């Protein structure tokens, strides 16, 4: 059943997908930093307020993924920011996250060599988001 | 992003800093699946990054975004040579053989390519 985008239910399903992924488990071995996703507001897309997704990831597992404020996400070790519609493109496989980062469509803050070392893990993390059925606020 | 990656690498690693300080070359990177690229002009201790491909490049790397990331994940082995026999290295070599990674200007610039690869490497 589809869940509302960037809701608590979405975060729980996303966390479950990450923890089910053997690819992620292997690729993210040694990862020990928090990752924040900042989903910037787009009122014209029925997404009026920015939200943050705080991911506590450790050694190939997601210890927790929670939705909260953008400020909370910005306090993480690595922060990826983009407007709502860009994140939707990522989650619906319209935009590859690696390409998005290279093009500056997704803004990345944090130690670049570390995140590049875990490219495969971040690609699989993106795959996990695409496996969560979502109800998008601009499609209601 | 590539400029930022190089900045971080040379700040953290004296060997990469040494390579960076010694390298004088103009390197183009064209990302084929987004149809965008940059020119990295290594000026012996400084780097000028320009969008698009500038003329008079010593080397031009043309490949997809994923392979650009994989090039940064190549391990550096003995004598400062990139390792092509582990999983990442085999993937890069396969792309080269399939024509999905093209390196123009390779002839005569192998040492430059190896130096650039070392500077890019996050391993």
Image: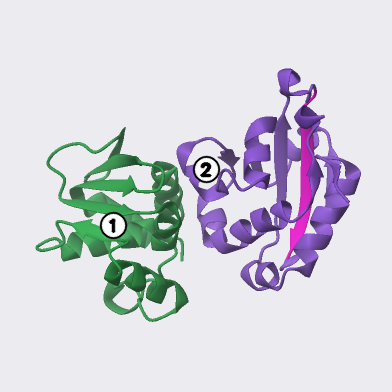
Chain colours: A purple, B green
Say above or below: A46 vs A21: above
- Please say whether residue A81 is visible from this viewpoint: no
Q: In the rendered picture of this protein, how many numbered marks are placed on residues?
A: 2
Q: What are the residue bounds of the magenta stretch?
A: A49-58
Which residue matches tag 1?
Answer: B116
The secondary element bearing badge 2 is classed as: helix
- Please say whether residue A100 is visible from this viewpoint: yes
Q: Chain of mark 1?
A: B
The secondary element bearing badge 1 is classed as: helix
Between B84 and A140, the one lying in front of the other is A140
Determine whether, in the image, residue B120 is placed left or right of residue A19.
left
> For the stretch drawn in magenta, what is the main secondary structure?
strand
Determine whether, in the image, residue A126 is placed left or right of residue A73.
left
> As drawn, which residue projects farthest toward the top?
A44
Do callouts 2 and 1 mark residues in contact (Cβ within 8 Å)?
no
Determine whether, in the image, residue B90 is placed left or right of residue B52.
right
> Tag on residue A101?
2
| Percent x, y of residue B82 | 32, 71
């Amino acid at each position: 059943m589809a869940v509302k985008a960037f809701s608590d239910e979405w975060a729980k399903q996303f966390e479950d997908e990450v923890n089910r992924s053997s690819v992620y488990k292997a690729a993210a071995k040694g990862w020990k930093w928090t990752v924040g996703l900042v989903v910037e507001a787009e009122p014209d897309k029925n997404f009026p307020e920015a939200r943050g997704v705080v991911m506590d990831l450790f050694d190939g597992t997601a210890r927790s993924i929670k939705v909260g404020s953008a400020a909370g996400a910005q306090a993480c070790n690595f922060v990826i920011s983009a407007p709502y519609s860009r994140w939707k493109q990522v989650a619906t496989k319209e935009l590859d996250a690696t390409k998005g980062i290279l093009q500056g469509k997704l803004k990345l803050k944090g130690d670049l060599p570390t995140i590049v070392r875990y490219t495969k893990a971040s690609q699989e993390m993106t795959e996990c988001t695409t496996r969560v059925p979502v109800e998008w606020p601009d499609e209601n | 992003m590539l400029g930022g990656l190089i900045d971080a690498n040379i700040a953290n690693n004296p060997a990469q800093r040494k390579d960076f300080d010694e390298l004088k070359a103009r390197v183009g990177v064209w990302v084929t699946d987004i149809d965008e690229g940059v020119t990295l002009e290594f000026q012996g201790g400084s780097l000028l990054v320009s969008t698009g491909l500038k003329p008079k490049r010593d080397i031009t790397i043309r490949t997809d975004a994923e392979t650009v990331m994989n090039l940064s994940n190549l391990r550096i082995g003995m004598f400062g040579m990139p390792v092509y026999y582990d999983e990442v290295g085999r993937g890069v070599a396969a792309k080269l053989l399939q024509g999905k990674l093209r390196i123009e200007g390779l002839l005569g610039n192998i040492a430059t390519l190896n130096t650039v690869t070392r500077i890019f490497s996050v391993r």
